[in-house]
Image (cartoon, grey):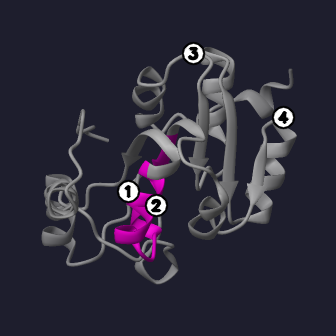
């Protein structure tokens, strides 16, 4: 295999944790899969049957170069066509902050997946708040690499916000982990 197509993003500490929660051989749907790092990791280490959905044509092309099955499109629309429990696990990794209607999306994910894993940058993390306090500017970090005027993020979410959202919608989390990255 070409090392360039199998190399994973070293800044994504959450990928190993997510991978540890997925059983070998699972049917996995990765929404907003980017360049396919999680799918590639799961394919190599867990022999999963994986599919990704990604909006960016450039990122889809990169996934295909890596031998991954990825559809190009808006996953909020694409998932409506899947039958109930089609996947063992649906992953929304570092993408929730870009979703237009999470209140509609999350129940759909629970419909098509037996389990759902969600990760997002914690805008309430002390280092992010400290950066805003000391600089007076929107933070730019490894997990938040965009300037405010050029970001795909349309939501600012903290862990506390997400827990409140889950309570409000009647969804009970099975496991949670905060990653200091």
Residue 26 pos. (x, y %) = 59, 24
| N-term-proximal mark, 1 vs 3 | 3
Dot 2, crowdedness within 10 Å: few (<14), some or many (≥20)? few
The N terminus is located in which quarter?
A: top right
Q: Of marks 3 and 2, which one's residue comes earlier in the chain?
A: 3
Mark 1 in CB contact with mark 3 (< 8 angstroms): no
Residue at the spot of label 1? 141
Q: Alpha carbon of mark 2 to alpha carbon of mark 4: how far? A: 27 Å
Name the residue tied to disc 3. 24
Please tell me whether mark 4 or mark 3 is closer to you in this view. 3
List x then y, in percent, for residue 166.
Answer: 21, 56
Q: Vertical placement of 46 versus 163: above or below?
A: above
Q: Earlier in the sequence, mark 4 or mark 1?
A: 4
Q: Secondary structure at mark 1?
A: loop
- Helix, strand, or loop for circle 4? loop
How many discs appear? Answer: 4
> Does label 4 or label 3 sit earlier along the sequence?
3
Q: Is residue 93 visible?
A: no
**Which numbered disc covers residue 67?**
4
Can residue 70 be seen from the camera position used here? yes
Q: Are marks 3 and 2 in contact (CB under 8 Å)?
A: no
Front position among marks 1 and 3: 3
Question: Where does label 2 land, which residue?
Answer: 145
User: Residue 100, located in which quarter of the rendered image?
Assistant: bottom left
């Amino acid at each position: 295999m070409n090392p360039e197509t199998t190399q994973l993003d070293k800044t994504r500490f959450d990928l190993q944790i997510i991978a540890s929660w997925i059983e070998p051989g699972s049917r996995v749907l990765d929404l907003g899969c980017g360049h396919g790092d999680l799918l590639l990791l799961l394919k190599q280490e867990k022999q999963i049957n994986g599919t990704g959905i990604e909006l960016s044509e450039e990122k889809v092309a990169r996934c295909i170069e890596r031998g991954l099955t990825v559809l190009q499109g808006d996953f909020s629309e694409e998932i409506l066509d899947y039958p109930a429990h089609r996947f063992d696990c649906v992953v929304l990794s570092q993408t929730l902050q870009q979703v237009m209607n999470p209140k509609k999306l999350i129940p759909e994910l629970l419909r098509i997946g037996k389990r759902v894993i969600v990760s997002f940058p914690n805008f309430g993390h002390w280092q992010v708040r400290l950066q805003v306090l000391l600089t007076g500017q929107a933070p730019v970090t490894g997990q938040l690499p965009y300037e405010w005027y050029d970001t795909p993020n349309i939501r600012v979410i903290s862990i506390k916000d997400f827990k409140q959202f889950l309570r409000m919608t009647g969804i009970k989390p099975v496991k949670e982990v905060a990653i200091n990255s």
